Image: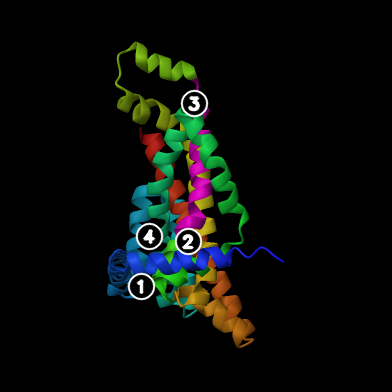
């Protein structure tokens, strides 16, 4: 006799589908609408125009070096003939990272202030980081069917743990002297958080954001198996057809997207810190 968790989880998933179908349908519509809007915005301009716009914005936000690197990354995606797939992947990653950070950041702050919350979250995060990433796709597909929505949901779940852990670490390691100084001058807790703790925690938060972006990109590639589109679908196509050229081009394009998002986020935050 063997233990089969699926025998317990399958009825629960069926019950969720039957009881909360309108709610899941609403989530699907919202995510599809957001993704479609972002993709349409990226594809509205010709590739050369979007590359030029990103270079200008990157130069203003992060500096000339980051702008040149951003132009090279996007130019590579264009020259490989995977422009549309790259824009789809960037849209998927942006939505997943924004939602993952929006969930993990406040939870990390709460966990840094309340050891009981961290103790309760720790085993959950251990399980989330230990389970193979493709396993998240199974319940997501069972609830949301094939497509981009289960890919986004599974990607968010996979991207939350590193950001949450490092947010907790970042705010826990802020020197008490800085917080006591803020309290001594009569600053409110919100002002202490954003004016004192957040700048001190920024380097560790950047590491968390970097890890979230990279893990999200890895999950988006796996999500190509469930019809999420983008570069993940190209990698899957190259694998199933044994086309080494296509798989290699798509893999290098994923690297270019990862470098682009990492350097843009890091450069923009560093420029903001130096200007503060």
Q: Which mark is residue 174?
A: 3
Are dots 3 and 4 in contact, CB under 8 Å? no
Q: Is residue 138 left or right of residue 242?
A: left
Task: State the residue in front, 239 or 40.
Answer: 239
First-in-chain label (3 vs 1): 1
Task: State the residue in front, 135 or 271.
Answer: 135
Disc 3 versus disc 1: distance between alpha carbons? 44 Å
Q: Which residue is mark 4?
A: 95
Asked if residue 136 is among those painted magenta in the image, a careful observer would answer no
Task: State the residue in front, 106 or 141.
Answer: 141
Region in magenta: 154-175
Q: Quadrant of residue 21?
A: bottom left
First-in-chain label (1 vs 2): 1
Q: Which mark is residue 48?
A: 1
Residue density around tag 1, few if under 14, some if 14–19, many if 20 or more, within 10 Å: few
Residue 268 location in percent, x, y? Answer: 40, 46
Q: Secondary structure at mark 1?
A: helix
Q: Secondary structure at mark 3?
A: loop
Q: Secondary structure at mark 2?
A: helix
Q: Which residue is mark 2?
A: 155
Residue density around tag 4, few if under 14, some if 14–19, many if 20 or more, within 10 Å: some
- Rendered view: 42 above or below 116: below
* Residue appearing at x 31%, y 66% in the figure: 38
- Rendered view: 81 above or below 18: below
Q: Is residue 40 left or right of residue 118?
A: left
* Residue appearing at x 55%, y 83% in the figure: 237
């Amino acid at each position: 006799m063997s233990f089969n968790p699926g025998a317990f989880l399958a009825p629960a998933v069926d019950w969720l589908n039957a009881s909360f179908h309108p709610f899941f349908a609403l989530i699907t519509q919202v995510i599809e609408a957001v993704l479609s809007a972002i993709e349409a915005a990226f594809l509205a301009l010709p590739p050369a125009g979007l590359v030029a716009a990103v270079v200008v914005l990157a130069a203003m936000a992060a500096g000339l070096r980051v702008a040149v690197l951003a132009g090279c990354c996007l130019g590579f995606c264009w020259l490989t003939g995977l422009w549309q797939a790259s824009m789809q992947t960037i849209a998927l990653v942006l939505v997943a990272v924004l939602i993952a950070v929006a969930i993990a950041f406040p939870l990390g702050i709460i966990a840094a202030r309340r050891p009981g919350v961290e103790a309760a979250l720790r085993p959950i995060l251990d399980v989330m980081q230990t389970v193979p990433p493709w396993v998240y796709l199974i319940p997501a597909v069972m609830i949301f069917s094939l497509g981009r929505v289960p890919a986004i949901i599974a990607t968010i779940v996979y991207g939350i743990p590193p950001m949450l852990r490092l947010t907790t670490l970042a705010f826990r390691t802020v020197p008490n002297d800085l917080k006591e100084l803020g309290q001594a001058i009569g600053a409110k807790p919100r002002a202490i958080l954003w004016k004192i703790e957040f700048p001190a925690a920024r380097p560790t938060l950047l590491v968390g954001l970097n890890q979230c972006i990279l893990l999200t990109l890895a999950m988006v590639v796996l999500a190509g198996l469930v019809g999420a589109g983008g570069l993940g679908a190209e990698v899957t196509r190259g694998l199933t057809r044994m086309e080494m050229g296509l798989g290699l081009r798509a893999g290098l394009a994923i690297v270019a997207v990862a470098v682009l998002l990492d350097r843009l986020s890091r450069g923009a935050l560093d420029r903001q810190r130096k200007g503060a």
